[in-house]
Image (spheres, grey):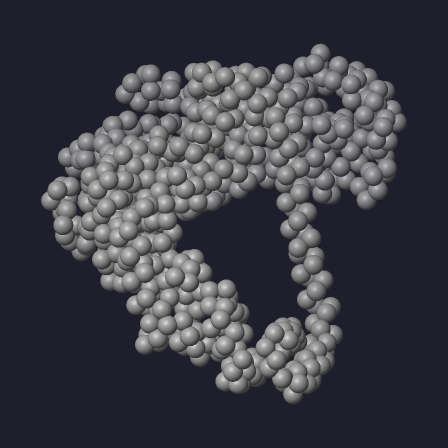
Amino acid sequence: MPDYTFTNLSPLDFEELCRDLLQKELEIRFESFGPGKDAGIDFRYTTDKSNGIVVQCKRYEHWKDLWPSLKKELPKVRQLQPYRYILVTSCPINDTQKSKILKLFDPYILNRSDIIGRGDLNNLLSDFRNVELNHPKLWIPSTNVLERVLHSRVVNQVIAEKKQIERTLQVYVENESYARAVKILNERRWVIISGIPGIGKTTLARMLVASFMAQGFEELVTASDSIRDAFELAKEDTSQIFFFDDFLGRVFLNKELPTNEDKRIKTFIDIAEGNKNKLFILTTREYILSQAIQRYEFRKPSIELSKCIVELEHYTRKNRARILYNHLYYSNIGVAHLNDLLRDKNYLKIIDHKNYSPRLVEEMISIEDMWRSIPHGEFTNRFLENLEDQELIWSTAFENEISRFSQYILINLITAGTPIYYEDLRTLMVAFASRFSQKYGFSYSGLDFKKAMRELEQCFISVDKAKYGDELIVTFHNPSIEDFLINYLRSDEDLIYDILDAAPLFNQFFNIFTLDGSNPVQMFKTKLRGRIVVDGTIKELIINRTMSSIAELGSSELESIDFPRKKREGPYSRLDILRGETRGINDKRIDEFLKAEFTKVSSPSLLMRPEDYREYVCLSRRLGPDYFENKPEILKRFFAKVCRISQFEEFEKLEPLFPEEYEELTQTDDFKEHLRDVIERETDDADDSETLESVLAAAEQMNHDYNVFIQDLKDTLEEKIEEAKEEEEGEDENNEQIILPENNEKDEVEENADDDEDKNIDSMFDSLRELKS
């Protein structure tokens, strides 16, 4: 029978273990409340609040601590009046102590078996082995894992690794990466854990080490600087785990692997694959692994099968909350600093932050010098500031661990923005490299570009096939990368000038750059934290290039990732962007250019596309009537293109600009006949009652405003509406019992799930006030 003390579990871990055991034993599913202000309830099973089973969990090591706590619980239990009260504790309880508890909680504890102490819990664990296996933080330390012989060249490394594993066991929160890595190790005997900096690669690796040693592996061998350590300490008759943390990172700082290191690593992988008593665990950053595959003999196809990528998406909201909770629970953090995180639920700001990083959570809480240096009233704000500023995480990787050409791909990419087609990014880099590759010290070819993109993929960037279509689309892997790159570029005016001087895309000029730092709308126009304010020669370059090449510059802006198509840019949208970006600049050249260009694209000889209506009207209203020549002709040409009600609604917005010309046009028979044609077309195309009713309302408004005489069209619309409604009612009768309840029920379940998650997270952090006081 197991003999666990349960002291290595946090209160939350202990409660979840108790819940899982009792659900198996009683064959029911409990409603969970978690730690915190639970009113005497940790779990409950009931269909009637006054007549149910209530479970309370008490994680104490000694009776002297448990008994006073139980006496405090008594008033809560009396208020609850449960039919059955079950007490579970990690404290060892003898027969006399059980009698005292039974008497204290009479009549709510029905029998002695509902008082479950340490011995009873271990007995349940022996009956339900699956529960035991599902709680590795329980069973890993019990097998003296941390006391096994740890091999390394330096004794201090052994001690450090042992302490790190101990810490990992306390704070680790299992996510889907753990199960996937275990499966890979069981099947292939080696695994490469990769991902972005700070995502939890080493933490996962240490958890795997502890888990497999608990299952019987005898030795851990930590490779320090070279795989040579693993070869020298391998023993044929001993089950061993070989752990090589950041196996490429340290050597890549020097840009080269030791001689034949790649071949030795490959050989050791082959050894591990063919040996049941050997496991090989490696960690690395994804972009470094991509670089190594290209440069060295790591082209073995099985690498992809043995790779486990840790991504932020693997951390659910509950996972993030538990990681923060565990670090706080096991830390020495001061009460005042803790209270600042708990105040007004500030912890939610960290859990839900777009740049959430397990590494940063650990640094802010577990490193005493970090939190002690911050006034307790500013702790949450400083925490959030560090999440916003990801320079610590990305600067080393960017400056030291990727090729120079890869660096300039990222810098150019941030100016264009993502999502972007792969081929558009290639075009962008051809334009920059053809002029500045020598100046910035990198070589360029089609092969160089492919290698660099593979190096960056899945860490700095993602390259995915479009959901609809065959195009490849590039996006940044993490929003914090974008923030880092903007801040990195902000102070390098020479590089900014060169990028814009070579820029082949119009959106490069205004995606992260602004000419007017006094305008808050322009400063925070993008999803990023703040745009780069440019002045002087860069400002002149932007004005000159956009004015001289406004029609020739390309564009890479996509409407969305799911439906990746270029944002349509008519002859008016770029003028509108230029007008908005230069609005605060007093420069006659710009005003004269806008007037000349707008006159050119508004000429009656220019055929306007129907899809340009909205952009044309928007720009016209912003520029004002002084920009127009031959107003009657412009109105006629515009109206002649109107073929939908929505387009006519845009046309009406021109009335304030041309009041006299507008009035004259709307009085003509041609105008009224054209409106009738528009209504007829919409009537023919509409096929449901809602759309038809919308057409009818618009037609009646047109008749009121312009005296169009549409009585015959109105009669036709009303008949079609009645027919459509009868058809829709028949469809509703056939589908009512199948569709409506299912959709309503789904929405209700999702809403309740969100509410329950919020309550559980709040309850979890509420408990810290009492536990840490």
Residue 721 occupies quadrant: bottom right
- Who's the residue at 70% across and 64% down the image? 740
Residue at the outermost right position: 107
Q: Nearer the viewer, residue 493 or 145?
A: 493
- Comparing 577 with 272, the one in front is 577
Residue 50, image x, y percentages: 86, 37
> Is residue 111 shown above or below 189?
above
Q: In the rendered view, does 608 fall on the left or right side of 92?
A: left
Report the residue at 50% width, 17% height from top: 375
Residue pushed farthest top?
64
Question: Split into 4 quadrants, where in the image is the N terminus?
Answer: top right
- Asked if 206 appears above or below 576 in the picture, the reply is above
Q: Position of residue 701 (x, y in %)?
A: 63, 73
Expressed as whole percent of the image width and height from the top left, the position of residue 218 reads 41, 28
| Foreground of the two, 404 or 525 | 525
Quadrant of the frame with the C terminus: top right
User: Can the viewer see residue 559 in this picture?
Assistant: no
In the drawing, does residue 659 fall left or right of residue 218?
right
Residue 59 x %, y % = 66, 22
Quadrant of the rendered image containing residue 569: bottom left
Q: Residue furthest bottom?
A: 712
